[in-house]
């Protein structure tokens, strides 16, 4: 059997093999409160997938949604406050 090789020297991008940059890690750290709040909401929703939500489940989901909205608002406000002004 004959081996079929790539004609081009680089077929796949090597950028995917690299570690995240410091800027990417900083962006993840900045978004971590939103990520955590969304995970809590997802956990609360997963609990109710196979059964009718109890009043406690409904309250937990509602509070988790509020935490997501607060975290997104704070992230957006932080981004707007740090953005350069346009003249």
Image (cartoon, grey):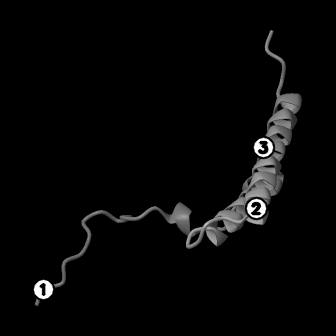
The mark lying in front, picked from 2 and 1, is 2
Task: Name the residue that disc number 1 marks.
Answer: 2
- Quarter holding the N terminus? bottom left
Q: CA distance from mark 3 to mark 2?
A: 21 Å
Seen at 12% across and 86% down, the residue is 2
Seen at 24% across and 75% down, the residue is 5
Quarter where residue 32 is shown? bottom right
Disc 1 vs disc 3: Cβ atoms closer than 8 Å?
Answer: no
Using the rendered image of the protein, determine whether residue 22 is visible from the camera's viewpoint: no
Task: Look at the picture and state if 87 lies above or below 1.
Answer: above
Q: Secondary structure at mark 3?
A: helix
Q: Residues within 10 Å of mark 1 (few under 14, many from 20)?
A: few
76 or 50, which lies in front? 50
The numbered mark at residue 25 is none
The mark lying in front, picked from 3 and 2, is 2
Quarter where residue 64 is shown? bottom right
Seen at 82% across and 47% down, the residue is 71
Q: CA distance from mark 2 to mark 1?
A: 66 Å
Residue 25: x and y, percent? 77, 59
- Quarter holding the C terminus? top right
Task: Name the residue that disc number 3 marks.
Answer: 69
Query: Of callouts 2 and 1, which one flags the residue occurring earlier in the amino acid sequence?
Result: 1
Task: Name the residue that disc number 2 marks.
Answer: 55
Q: Secondary structure at mark 1?
A: loop
């Amino acid at each position: 059997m004959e081996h079929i090789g790539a004609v081009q020297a680089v077929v796949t991008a090597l950028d995917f093999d690299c570690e995240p940059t410091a800027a990417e890690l900083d962006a993840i750290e900045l978004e971590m409160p939103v990520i955590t709040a969304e995970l809590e909401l997802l956990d609360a929703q997963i609990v109710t997938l196979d059964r009718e939500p109890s009043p406690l489940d409904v309250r937990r989901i509602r509070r988790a949604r509020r935490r997501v909205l607060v975290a997104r608002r704070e992230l957006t406000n932080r981004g707007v406050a740090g953005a350069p002004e346009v003249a």
